[in-house]
Image (cartoon, grey):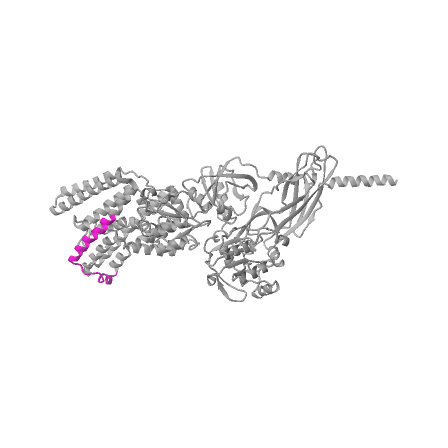
Amino acid sequence: MRTLIASLASVLLAVGVAAAAPKVGQTAPDFSGTTSGGETISLDQFAGKRVVLEWTNHDCPYVKKHYNSGNMQSLQRRATADDVVWVSVISSAPGKQGHVSAAQANDLTASRRAGPSYVILDESGEIGQLYGAKTTPHMYVIDEARVLQYSGAIDSIPTSNQADIARADNYVSKALNSLRNGQGIVTKQSKPYGCSVKYGS
Amino acid sequence: MTRALFLAVATVLCVLSSAFAQVSPAVTTNNATTRLVAEHVSAAPGETITLALLQNLREKWHVYWRNPGDSGLPLNLSWKVSEGFEAGEVLYPLPHQLPLGPLVNYGHEGEPTFLIPLTVPQNAVPGMNVSVTVDATWLICDEERCVPEDGTLRLILPITAERGALNTPYQERIAAARAEQPTPPSFEVSYFHTDEGPVLRLEGPPEGTLEFYPYTPSLTEPAGEVRLAQEGETLFMGFTAAFAYEAARPERLGGVLVVEEDGTRTGYELFAPQVKAPATSPFPVPVPLTSSAAATPAPPLLGVTLGLAFLGGVILNLMPCVFPIVFLKALGFASVSREERGIVRRHGLLYTAGILVAFLGLAGMLLALRAGGDALGWGFHLQSPLAVGVFAIIILLVGLNLSGVFEMGTSLQGVGEGLARQGGSAGSFFTGLLAVAVAAPCIGPFLGGAVGVALARPAVEGLLIFGTIGLGLAAPYLLLSFVPGFVSLLPKPGAWMETLKQLFAFAMYATLVWLVWVVSTQAGSDGVLRVGLALLVTGLAAWTFGRAQGAGGLFGRLASIVLLLGAVVPLLGVTPKPVSAQTETSENALTGVPYDEDVLATLRADGVPVFVDFTASWCITCQFNKKTVLDTAQVRKAFAVSNVTYMVADWTVRDPVITAALEAQGRAGVPLYLYYPAAAQTPQILPQLLTVEGVLETLE
C-alpha cells in the first residue's frame, strides 16, 4: 500500500496540457484572442477557410532556424496567397522568453519580413493550453470545416541547423497541398520539436 | 647532454600522451563542459570497451533523455572512427521528470554520464593509436531558455595486446553510471489497452515511488494523468495515450521503470508484452477521457447535467407507459375540495418520495453492482428476461386495472375518489414507485447523457443526478399539489374519465406487446411461452380479485394473491439466449456483423469505413432509428456504395465488452452510433435520434 501512496504523490503534478488537447480528425476548439493589431479574432470567424496556427517565440533557436533561413516566411506567403489564414500565436507568459508587447510583435513581423495574417498575444497561455501546444514551433492545420487536420512539427528533421531544412519533409506545406488538392494527408501528426512553450507556472 | 635532454623530453611527452590519450580535451560551451573518455587506458583487438561522454551542466540547466518528453531533444552523436571500429547505442542515465509549467520533460541535471560501447575490430594492430572522434550536439535548457550546443570530442585510444588498466580519474564515475543502468525486472510485467491509454501491470514490483519512462516518444502524455491501482501484490499504472499510441499500439511497451525508495533510484528495463485487457477495469472509478467527440471536450458541469437530468425526468411523464398513470392521478385532484389542500400536499410529497425511493434504489443497485465489478450500464434492469417478465406483469396489472377488471381504490391506483381516505397515503407512495417501474423501460434519449455522466462520477454525485431525474418525474404532480391554481387548468372530472381510463389501458397493452417482443429476442420462443403463461395467471389473479371485490369475499382476495405469486413461477425458468444480429436478417434487411474489437481494428487498419450501431431490442429509440433510418433502402444503398461495414453491438443481454466500449464514449447506455471514416483516428458520434439525411451526410 505504501508503494501506491508514494506513487500517487509523484503523479499529482500530472495534469498538464495533455488532457484537453484536440485530436486530429476532430473539430478544432474555438478560441478568441487579441492580435498585435488590437483586434479580437476567433477561429469561428474563419469558417470556410483553411487556418494554420503557428506557436512561436522569436528568441527560441528552433524558431530562429525557420525565420533566419526564410523558411517560415515563405510558408506564410505561399499559404496566405492561397487564401489560408495564418495565425502566429505567442503563449510566452510575461517575463518569460519570447513574451512581447503588441508593438514588439509588429516590429518582429516587419523586421523579419514575416507574413502571418494575424499574431495573437496569448500571454495567459489559454489558447496554447487549449490546443496542447508544447513547443515553438508547434504547427496546426485546420480545414474549411474546422476539423483539425495536422498537429505537430513543422518538418521531419528535429535540429536547430538551418542546413537541414532543405533535406526535411515540410509537414505543414504537405498538409496544405493535400487539403487544397482534396487528397488525404499522409502525415497527420508528428512529435513537435523545439523549445518548450514558455507558459506561466 | 643534448641527447639526454631530448630523451627526457621525449619520455615525458610519451608518458603525458599515454596518460591523457584516452581523454578528449574538454569542450566548454556556455552551459556545459563536455568530454569523452575511455574506461580503460588501452583496448585489445576484438573486444568491446566502454566510452563515456561526461557532461557537467550549469546549475538548473538540463539535457534530455532518449525520449525527451513534451519538448526537447536527446543527445545526437555522429562518430568518426577508423574502419572496423563501431560505436553502439548510447546508454542514458536514469531519467528524471522535469516539469515546466503544464509540460513535463524527461532529462538530466547536474553531471550526467552517457555510456557508449565501442567495438575494436579483430584486425586492429597492438601498438597503434586510434583516433576516436565524435560530433556531439545536445539541446540544453533551463526554465527560461533552450540552447542547442555542440562540440567535437576527440581522444586517442592505444591498442594493446591485453586490455589496459582502468582510467583512474574517471573510473568511479563510469562505474557509478554503469551501476545505475536499468536491469531486467525480477517481476512479471505486461500491458493492456484501455481507451484512456496503455495500462502497465506489474506483478509484485519493489516498494517505492514508481515512475515509468517509455522509450518511444509520444506513446503516452508525459504530463498526462497516471492512474494507479493495486490488487494484492499486483500494481497497475494507467497512462494517458498520446498520438503515436493511438496510431499504432506497440506489441511491447518498452521503457524504464524507476523505483525510488529512501532516496535511492533503481531502474528496470521493461519490454511489457501486450495482453488482453481484464474484463473489469482495475481502476476504481472509470473516467472516460475520450468523452463524446469534440462537441464536449470537457466533462459537462454538474449544474448543466443536473438541469438536463431534471428536464429528462419531466419529459418521462409523457412516455406512453407513464402518462396514463400520472395524468389520471392528476385528474383526481380536480375533484378534491379546497379544504383538503393539506391532504393533497401530503399526497404530492408521498408520491415524490415513492419516486425518489424507487429511483435511488435502482441507481444504488446499479452503482453497487458496478463497484462490485459487474460491467453494467443503464438499462441493465432490462438485460435480464426475468426482470422484463416482471415488468410485463406490472404493466398488465396496470392495464387491467385501467380496463376496470379490478379496482385498487385505496392502494395502487387511487384515482380520485380514494384520495382523502387514510389508505390513500400509502397509495400515493406506491403510485410513485409504480411510476418509476413503468418508466424504467422507457428511459430513453433524453437521459442517456445524464445517466452516462452519473455513472462516471463519484457515487454521491451519481445518486444526486439520479435523484434529480426522479424529481423531474415528480415535478408536474408536485406542482399540481402545491399550486392550487394549476388544478383549475385541468378538465372537469366526469364520465369521460372512465372512457379515457379504459382507452389508456391500451397504451399499457402496447407496452406489453413490446416487452414480450423483447423477451423473444432475449430468451427465444421458450421465453415468450413462459412470459405468456405468467401473464395468463396474472390475468386470472386480477379477475379473481375483481370478482372478490364485488362480492366482498376474503377467500377470493387471498386466492388472487396466491395466483399472482404463482404467476412469477414460470418466469423463474427463463434462460437468456443471446441472439446475434444476424438472426433477424432477411434478404432485404440491413445485414450487420457482430461487434468485435479485433475485427473493428482490422477493418480500420485496412481503411474500411465502419458504422457501429450500439443497440438493444428493449431500447425503443434504437428500434425506431433502425426501422425508420438505418434499415431503409436509402441508407442500405449508401452503406453499399461507400463500402461501409455495418457493425452491430447488441447490448440486449449483458456484455462487458460493449459496456466498456460505451463508457469509453462517455455513455452509460444505448443507443450510440459511431462512424469511423476510412483512415480516421477517431469516430464521429451521431445523434441519438437519427435522420436519413444526417446519416447520408455523415457517410459523405
The x and y percentages for residue B383 are 32, 43
The x and y percentages for residue B50 are 65, 38
Q: In which quarter of the image is the C terminus of chain B?
A: bottom left
Please name whichever residue, B90 or B257, is drawn nearer the observer in this view of the structure: B90
Q: Main secondary structure of the magenta part?
A: helix
Please name whichever residue, A164 or B636, is drawn nearer the observer in this view of the structure: B636
Q: Is B403 on the left or on the right of B74, as rendered?
A: left
- The number of callouts visible is 0
The x and y percentages for residue B544 are 15, 44
Q: Is B163 on the left or on the right of A27, as rendered?
A: right
> Magenta part of the protein: which range?
B483-511
Mark yes or no: residue B461 visible.
no
Above or below residue A77? Residue B668 is above
Q: Which residue lies furthest to the left in this view?
A: B551
Q: Residue furthest top?
A: B162
Please name whichever residue, B686 or B397, is drawn nearer the observer in this view of the structure: B686
**Residue B505 falls within the magenta-colored stretch:** yes
The x and y percentages for residue B176 are 63, 39
Above or below residue B597? Residue A162 is below
Q: Quadrant of residue B583?
A: top left
Mark yes or no: residue B326 visible.
yes
Q: In which quarter of the image is the N terminus of chain B?
A: top right
Q: Is B677 on the left or on the right of B15, as rendered?
A: left
**Residue B513 falls within the magenta-colored stretch:** no
Q: Is B148 on the left or on the right of A179, as rendered?
A: right
